[in-house]
Every structure is written in C-alpha cells, then in structure tokens.
Image (cartoon, rainbow, N blue to C red):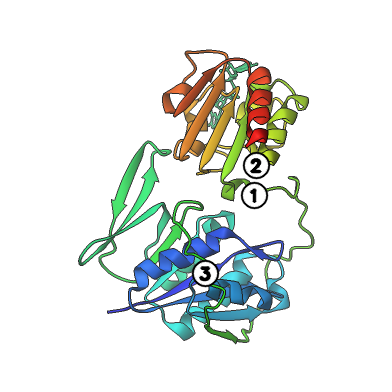
C-alpha cells in the first residue's frame, strides 16, 4: 500500500538547495504508490513551489510567515508540526544539513518518533526498506530498518540521486496559515563568512588544501581550478588552524562532511579526522610530496609531487577540454 511522505524543502538565499530534490527522490522510494508532499517554510517561498513539483513532489504545502524569515528551530518546528498534524503522514524526509540536524531531533521528540539520521542509501526489499548510514567517522556502515512507528530520516546531501526535472509536471500547491507563537530567539542579521561561491556541502567538485598550501595566497591556484570545474574550495583543519583560510571551509570530523563526485586533496596528509569528512567522495585524487602520506590510502589516483607545480598543470589541461 502506498504511503504519504512529507519532505521539507530547504532554502538558502531564497533558492532551494539540491538536498530538497534529493529528499523528494528519497520520499518517492518510501511512498511507493502513495504521494510525496513537499513543505516550504519561510516569509516568501511561493516562487519555489513549482520547482518542487517539477522534481517529483505530488503536492506542495506552503507556510509563509514573517517569523519564518530566518531559520529558528522554534519557529520552523511549530510550522512543520502544524503541517504534520494536518497531513498525518506515514513518513518524513529532511536533509542532513545544519538546519536538518538541528530541526529533526526536535520534531522527532515532539512526535515521539525514532529518527534515522545521515542516511546515504535506501534499499527496497520485497517487504521491508533498509536504510544505510555511515558510522565511526565513515569507517563502517550500519543497516537499519524501522519496525514500528513512523518513518523519519535525514539524508546526507549528494548521496541520493534527485529525479530528472519535468517542466510539464503538475501538482497542487496550497498555502496554509499557521499561528506561530512568539519566538524565543530573534535573528537580527546573518553574517556569512564565506563568499557566494558553490556551497561546499553540495559541491560536485571540491579542491581542498592543507597545511602544504603554506599560506592564504597558496590557495589561489586551488580556487582557480575550482572555478574552472564549477566546484568549491575546502580545507583541512591544519590549513584553518594556520589561518590560511576560514574555518567554514574545514572538512572532517569537526568540520563539514562532504561527498562530491571529485575530491582533489592538495597538501593534505590524510589524518583520520580529515578522512572522516571526505572518504566517501566518489573519486579521490591526492597530490602530496610525501609518497608515504596516509591520504594515498584512500585515494583513487595519487600524484606524488609539489602541488604548486601539479595544480597549475591540471588547470591548464582542464582548460583544453
Ligand atoms: P599536515 O598533517 O601538516 O600535512 C601537510 C601535508 O602537506 C603533508 O603530508 C606534506 O607532505 C604535504 N605537503 C607539504 N608541502 C607540499 C607541497 N608543496 N606539495 C604537496 N604536498 C605538500 N583535521 C581536519 O582536517 N578536519 C577535522 O575536522 C579535524 N578534526 C579534528 C578533531 C580533533 C578532536 C583532533 C584532535 C584533530 C582534528 N583534526 C582535523 C586535525 C588532524 O588531526 C590533522 O592535524 C590535520 O588534518 C592536519 O592537516 P593537514 O593534513 O593539512 O596538515
């Protein structure tokens, strides 16, 4: 029998993040013959509804309220729970982003539901669904099934393929009013430290620099290659600690977890804490002067050499394509 799955659309700077479309694809797998209902929360989100339909949502429910202009767990949980109470879904899918990691446990707690977080794969068996998630900093994978209660999962960005966009797809879009009680936190302003480039956690290509980059200036050739490939620049904590770049670029156990199609590690030794954030990348290329560097243990392609020679050569070659 088909299920009804509620999916949260997540916006950044007024545009939907790709993880929203990946959540719809995950929702479709769980819904079977049922329906995927997308939820959009914000102060002005109407324009994004059609996109959710085009990427596979069957219906969209919009909650617009000035208290939802900036994300707060207080405001978003009130709005989401009100939609949940009206729709009574069989399951919920939310992106495992900073927002999703904050919001989902609160919702699960209010619904008295279990939560399987950071899902990277959904396997459909004949009479059950298995959720796969990395554990121990990506060194092992755990398989989980839900035996009782509603389905509630968060999905790691860039792991579940979104459906193909269908510009002719139609679906119902409905706005509902929700009475949001006074918020305990008022966000006055959001100051972003990173530039407006490609979002690191959703980037398909990441060029990451470590202490081997040696200075902030040393990141320039990496940025050039990232721009050429439509990717983003990331960093090890070594590079952040040395003040070569901002901590918002840090990848690893205490930084961002990324799963790009291509990860090029430049002057990064491959400490276990760094690998926890990038070892599930689809293709890993490591550039390091030291042939014994641990990063080569997880690399699909290794280049032993000076990054200041190798990276410009790669850029030159990619320019020819
Ligand atoms: P190094 O280990 O110093 O390596 C630099 C590499 O650059 C070397 O392999 C060297 O051979 C190479 N190199 C130098 N010059 C060149 C050149 N010209 N061309 C090519 N190669 C060159 N680290 C993270 O990254 N992310 C985390 O989230 C994180 N969390 C942590 C949490 C905890 C609790 C702890 C204790 C540590 C954490 N760390 C984290 C730190 C981690 O242990 C390492 O110290 C850090 O990853 C090292 O950064 P690095 O590889 O850039 O530097």
Q: Which mark is residue 65?
A: none
Front disc: 3 or 1: 3
Seen as rendered, the residue at the extreme front is 320
Q: Which mark is residue 232?
A: 2
Q: Nearer the viewer, residue 294 or 83?
A: 294
According to the picture, the residue beneath numbered tag 1 turns out to be 199
Q: Is mark 2 within 8 Å of ligand 1?
A: no
Q: Nearer the viewer, residue 30 or 33?
A: 33
| Res. 182 visible in picture | no
Front disc: 2 or 3: 3
Residue at mark 2 to residue at mark 3: CA–CA distance = 24 Å
Looking at marks 2 and 3 on the same chain, the residue that comes earlier in the sequence is marked by 3
Q: Is residue 210 above or below residue 89?
A: above
Q: Secondary structure at mark 1?
A: loop
Q: Is mark 1 within 8 Å of ligand 1?
A: no
Looking at marks 3 and 1 on the same chain, the residue that comes earlier in the sequence is marked by 3
Residue at mark 3 to residue at mark 1: CA–CA distance = 20 Å
- Near mark 3 (Cα within 10 A), the count class, few <14, some 14-19 or many ≥20, is many
Q: Quadrant of residue 194?
A: top right
At x 78% / y 52%, what residue is drawn? 191
Q: Quadrant of residue 181?
A: bottom right
Q: Is residue 259 above or below residue 310?
A: below
Classify the position of the N terminus by image quarter: bottom left
Contact (Cβ within 8 Å) of mark 2 with mark 1: yes
Q: Position of residue 321 (x, y in %)?
A: 62, 37
Q: Which mark is residue 55?
A: 3
Q: Secondary structure at mark 3?
A: loop
Q: Position of residue 275 (x, y in %)?
A: 48, 32
């Amino acid at each position: 029998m088909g299920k009804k799955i509620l999916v949260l659309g997540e916006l950044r700077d007024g545009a939907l993040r790709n993880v929203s479309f990946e959540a719809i694809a995950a929702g479709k797998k769980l819904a079977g013959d049922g329906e995927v209902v997308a939820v959009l929360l914000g102060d002005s989100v109407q324009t994004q509804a059609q996109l959710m339909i085009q990427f596979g949502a069957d219906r969209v429910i919009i909650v617009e309220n000035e208290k939802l202009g900036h994300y707060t767990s207080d405001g978003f949980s009130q709005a989401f729970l009100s939609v949940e109470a009206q729709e009574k879904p069989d399951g919920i899918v939310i992106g495992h982003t900073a927002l999703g990691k904050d919001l989902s446990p609160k919702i699960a707690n209010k619904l008295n539901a279990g939560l399987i977080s950071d899902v990277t794969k959904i396997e459909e068996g004949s009479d059950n669904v298995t959720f796969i998630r990395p554990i121990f900093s990506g060194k092992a994978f755990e398989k989980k099934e839900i035996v009782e209660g509603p389905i509630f999962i968060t999905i790691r960005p860039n792991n579940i393929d979104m459906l193909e966009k269908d510009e002719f797809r139609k679906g119902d879009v409905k706005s509902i009013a929700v009475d949001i009680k006074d918020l305990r936190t008022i966000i006055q302003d959001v100051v972003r430290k990173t530039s407006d480039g490609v979002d690191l956690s959703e980037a398909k290509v990441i060029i990451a620099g470590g202490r081997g980059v040696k200075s902030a200036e040393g990141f320039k050739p990496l940025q050039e290659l990232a721009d050429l490939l439509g990717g983003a620049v990331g960093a090890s904590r070594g590079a952040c600690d040395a003040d070569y770049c901002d901590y918002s670029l840090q990848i690893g156990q205490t930084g961002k977890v990324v799963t790009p199609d291509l990860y090029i590690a430049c002057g990064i030794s491959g400490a276990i804490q760094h690998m926890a954030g990038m070892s599930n990348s689809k293709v890993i290329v490591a550039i390091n002067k030291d042939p014994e560097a641990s990063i080569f243990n997880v690399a699909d392609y290794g280049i032993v050499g000076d990054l200041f020679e190798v990276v410009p050569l790669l850029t030159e070659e990619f320019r020819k394509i």
